[in-house]
Amino acid sequence: MTGQRLVLLLSLPALALGGCTREAASTTAAAPSVERERLLRFWDRFSGATASRIGHDFAKARDLYREALTLDPKHEDSLYYLGQCQRELKQPAEARQAFERLVEVNPASARGHLALGALLASPDPFEPMDVVVAEKHFRRAHEINGEETGPMVRLGEVLMLEGKLGEARRWFESGLRTNPKSVEAPFLMGYLTWENGDPGGALRFAQGARDAAKVQAPVKGVLNEGDRKDPQFVAAPPLTNPMGRMLFGELAGFVREAVRAGRGATDTDFVAAWRSVRRARREYERRVAGGRRS
């Protein structure tokens, strides 16, 4: 009898361990299933958000990106596009939160810093203007990706508003060296030269902007009806920016329009555009001053 009790007592730990093992195995088997379900739900929300954003249903896209982020709070694309949708919906404070969260998750996100800089240096009156903070983000974006022209030209724009005209000019020059087809860089260099009382020098930059606005169309292997044998020149694409409108660069648009129309932008056109830059600059400076007082 004593031997039977001893055998039973010795068996109890093994029985208990066997029960725990089966329970642990069950939990381990369930874990991949739960994770798989989470991933499926995340990608369903993210794909739906992307489709809605492409279809310009920004409110639906915003809501789906938010749902995706509850499942993966550090997903960089979701944070970035959530901020862009909120900008489209005229929700700059919420957009700023999304972009700030993005650079918190990934401090080396050039697009996150560029998006923040563009938001804080926007010509749209419903968005905030803080050129000091915008400058910091543009500089960081350039540190991360020094080959991108966008941060250079945008940085030059905010430096103009801060009165740092010499440094602004150097950034426009850097932008032009990086991208010789940038129309905005020579246009704004011409403006600074014009403001400095050198109209002749300014018009030399105007010619540079005209030249940059022309790009040679690719030569086709087979000529189609209407094609010409001589190289065809078409308008160069603008310095597009998914983060929003430039402060002054859009005023260079007339140069490309003149190319598309088959004519050249005149010196008078450039002077008129530079006067528009001057007026816009004064308005932005008032906004900056008003923001500092509030």
Image (spheres, rainbow, N blue to C red):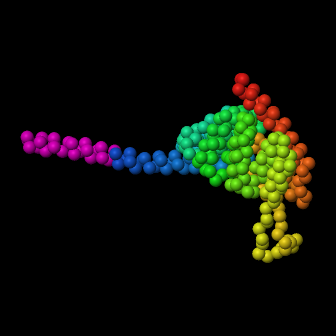
Q: Is 142 colored magenta in this rendering?
A: no
Q: Is residue 6 left or right of residue 60?
A: left
Rendering quarter of residue 69: top right
What residue is drawn where x is 81% and y is 33%? Answer: 283
Work out whether residue 167 or residue 60 is closer to the camera in this orientation and state it: 167
Q: Quadrant of residue 165?
A: top right
Above or below for 89 versus 53: above
Inspect this view and state whether residue 55 appears. no
The answer to which quarter of the image holds residue 104 is top right
Quarter of the picture holding the N terminus: top left
Residue 160, given in percent of the width and then of the height, sits at 74, 39
Residue 172 in view here = yes
Residue at 30% x, 43% y is: 20
* Residue at the extreme left of the image, as rendered: 2
Image position of 288 (left or right of 78):
right
Q: Quadrant of the C terminus?
A: top right
Which residue is at a point 72% across and 48% down the rendered structure image?
172
- Write the start and end of the magenta stretch as one range: 1-23
Image location of residue 238, percent across then percent down: 77, 53
Image spot of residue 136 (x, y percent): 63, 38
